Amino acid sequence: MIFFWTLPSMERSRRLDLARRAIADHDDTGAVAILEPLISKRPSDGEAAFLLARAARRCGDREQATRLTALARQGGALNELVDLEEALLRLGTAGPGAGQGFGLDADEAKALLVAARTGHPEAAVIYEALVDLAVRSFAMERAHAFASEWIAVSPDDWLPRVRRGDIRARFSLAADARQDYEAAIALRDDAPGAHAGLGIMLVRQLGDAAAAQPHLREALRTTPEDVPCLTAFAEALVRTSHISEAESILDRALVIRPDDPTGLRLRGLIDLENGFPEDAIVLLEQADRADPGNLETVAALARALALAGRDEAAREASARAVTLRQEAELLDPLIKQVLHEPGDADVRFRIGRALTRMGRLRDAREWLASALAFDPEHAEARRALESLDKTTGPVTDDHR
């Protein structure tokens, strides 16, 4: 009896307890590993199926989550919880051109938001899903608002602070983003994403390469193949004159992602500083093709071409750099304006037009589509988007 009933029951309880803790701490991959053996042995276990469905949804495996919610209902999981998971699964299929409100104003999304704002016991789960939906839908100002509400209902949770920090960093609100990342680290020293976000922002927005390095080292300790962290770390090392270590880090990054534009640009800059302009040109041209419209890349390419004696090409690159600098100066206040005037379709159109002139066509398409989502009658945005589609083809999920 002990062998056939008590021990399996104890093992089930142990695994369920571990899985609940993992999900509460946002370790969804860990929860999946804990729960899958239970479901494989006993597919009728409704509670295990429900927890695994939630973890799978948060990991992005919608197909598995859908299958598991059905098993959870059949296995006797609480209908209210299963209903919520099914509702959250239905969210998130919209893109920036999917219509007014980016799908966030659909009746079900509105109902979920009302529930979260009126004391629903799963409010934190709802806010997390709404933030993810808003980010995927390119509605960053709403993602910021939802993240702030999520922090209010979950003041001891590190994840909403990381999410809001990421949003703020994207809008160059560096001081505010730094506060969020540091608050997340205070709540959990190894909060996933916090050290990476803080380190990247310190080196690229606040210019403090020395302060960035310990955060990036910590991030790479747990995610050693994170290419944005690797390139940010290399950039911090270059700025603090640790060139040899930076070269080694960049070589690692480019093995993982050979066409990474930041890695190519930094490697080219090192070659340029070491007196090898021709080698630098090869790398910088690759970076320019991978990420058109990057001011730092084009400025470095202009220098490399001049040092290599390619005067005409250097003048052309220098002229491009001047234009990009002017556009960037116009762009920054417009992007920040979106947070204060999220419904202004014309601001979004102007951002898209500036990005188009800079050659950043994928980003431009997102902004133009979002302008049309807010104002389907915006003729200029429609013409600009149609022109982009003729040039490069319509947007796909790979471009988002």
Image (tube, rainbow, N blue to C red):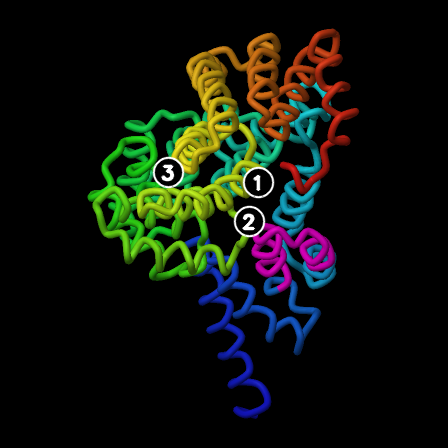
2 or 3: tag closer to the N-terminus: 3
- The numbered disc on residue 55 is none
Amino acid type, mark 2: Asp
Residue 43 picture quarter: bottom right
Callout 1: SS: helix
Q: In this view, does 74 lie above or below 115?
A: below
Label 3 near label 2: C-beta < 8 Å?
A: no
Determine whether the residue tagged by mark 3 lies in a helix, strand or loop. Answer: helix
Q: Which of 130 and 14 is in front in this view?
A: 130
Looking at marks 2 and 1 on the same chain, the residue that comes earlier in the sequence is marked by 2
Tags 2 and 1 touching, CB below 8 Å: yes
> Which one is in front, 399 or 243?
243
Magenta stretch holds residue 66:
yes
Say left or right for 14 vs 348.
left
Which residue corresponds to mark 2? 259
- Seen at 64% across and 41% down, the residue is 88
At x 70%, y 26%, the residue is 107
Q: Where is residue 385 in the image (x, y as percent from the top left)?
A: 72, 19
List x then y, in percent, for residue 209.
Answer: 24, 41
What's the amino acid at mark 3? Arg
Cα distance between the residues tagged 2 and 1:
7 Å
Give 226 or 46, whichever is nearer the viewer. Answer: 226
Residue behind mark 1: 290
Specify start and end residues of the magenta stretch as a single range: 49-68
* Residue type at the position of mark 1: Ala
